[in-house]
Image (cartoon, rainbow, N blue to C red):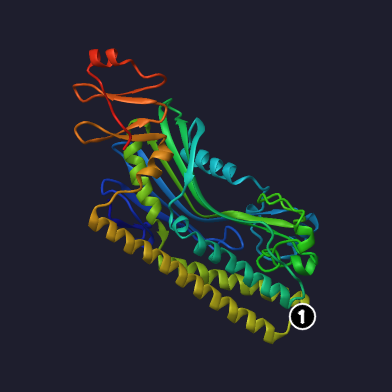
Amino acid sequence: MNSIKEFKDQNGNVLALAAIPDDYTIGSALNNEFQHETVPFFITAHAINTAKNIMIFGLSDEKFTTYKNQMIKGTLKYMQDIRWNSIRDFIEPEDYLFQFAAALSQMQKLTPVGEADLPSICGQNPQQAYQDFMALYEAAWQSDRQAGIETKPNNILVRSFMRRYDGVAKSGAACTVVAGMDYNGVEIYSPQANMLGAINPLFGMLGAAAQNKQAQNSSKQFGHGTPCDSIDWGSKYKFLMVSPKEHEQEAFEAFMEFVQTFHMSDQLRNSFYDALVQRSQMRMMETAKFQGMAQANMQSLMINQQRLTQTLAANSASMSAGIMDSWNKKMASDSRISQARSEATLGVNTYQTTYGQNVQVSVAADHVYQDKYGDVYGVSGAAPDQETLNNLNWTELNKK
């Protein structure tokens, strides 16, 4: 079990924390500009074992908006400082993960071979992750109601998952790539959508959904609900591991510990929410300009928004503190990451030899044997007959 390390930028500022082995070179960088209305900045972190050519990455916050209502999309030109790069066509979560993995790993070929839950901090606290994600939208809908526009959520997806890929590097070397993300998204719809409702992506366009009667006929698959004006989708954290095949087990264990503990530093997350409040207030002023909202209402909304971000910051700190405390207790008892999750992702089963050692063999093996020298063999299909086993001096092993 590895200790928690501080991931710093070139100026020595702590941007993130995570567990990683001591023989990895680590670093981090801050992209300090709005990527989306709800993403004031984001961080990237890396951990590299140069001797074994293992690379591990962690990236924070990314969000995109897909506009289904072109009339609403057309009103964006009246707003200040629109992040046009955050507007793109919706793609399925699995495709989003694949594009991320392909772009960052730079593999010549990438083939998905397995999927599992992601044991990130969000993945370990799914209810809190959902509540925090929806809290920002509830604040947006409150602002909409003040402006006389009703918006409610339709399809919502908050999901932490990962996939394993077989990769072929540009050099032709066989690699294992594992990518995961804390995905989140919400479909957006307002029966009263018009320019006054659309003028505020954070407060008018973060709302979602159909009237109850209409929603009954809507698809339950996220990204395909109707009616729908727009979709917000993206991730809170994304993760990637690239390893040569011969080191994939070691790399995967380090990756899992990294994933379970990686988070933006509390101080930086507080700054994230502070910047979001400022952006929200700017959009409120724009909305007030067009709709003549009363000053008292404006002040009330701003106070509520500040309280919300303080609550979110406290929740984030509490979640990370809980994980760190749990991790320290794990280190004290020298416990290991979940064997079952590792096996499911890597496609192996664990067997115990006659010497009491654990070995991992591909799930493709129907029978596993150990010879008199301690070597282990996996056999697919029918088991050899007893006479053959006696001649080879093989002993069949059982799954642990």
Image side of residue 267 versus residue 24, left or right:
right
Question: x%, y% of residue 218?
Answer: 75, 53
Question: x%, y% of residue 263?
Answer: 42, 59
Residue toward you, 171 or 329? 329
The quarter of the picture where residue 8 lies is: bottom left
Under tag 1, what secondary structure? loop
Image side of residue 42 versus residue 298, left or right:
left
Residue at the front extreme of this rendering = 386
- Residue at the spot of label 1: 292
Compared to 225, does 197 lie above or below? below
Residue at 31% from the left image edge and 32% from the top image edge: 398
Image side of residue 218 versus residue 237, left or right:
right
Residue at 51% from the left image edge and 32% from the top image edge: 111
The quarter of the picture where residue 385 lies is: top left
Question: x%, y% of residue 57?
Answer: 42, 47
Question: x%, y% of residue 308?
Answer: 55, 74
Compared to 338, does 372 lie above or below? above
Residue at 54% from the left image edge and 78% from the top image edge: 307
Q: Amino acid at mark 1?
A: Gly
Q: Residues within 10 Å of mark 1 (few under 14, many from 20)?
A: few
Residue toward you, 88 or 233? 233
Residue toward you, 45 or 320? 320
Residue toward you, 169 or 114? 114
Q: How many marks?
A: 1
Residue at 52% from the left image edge and 69% from the top image edge: 273
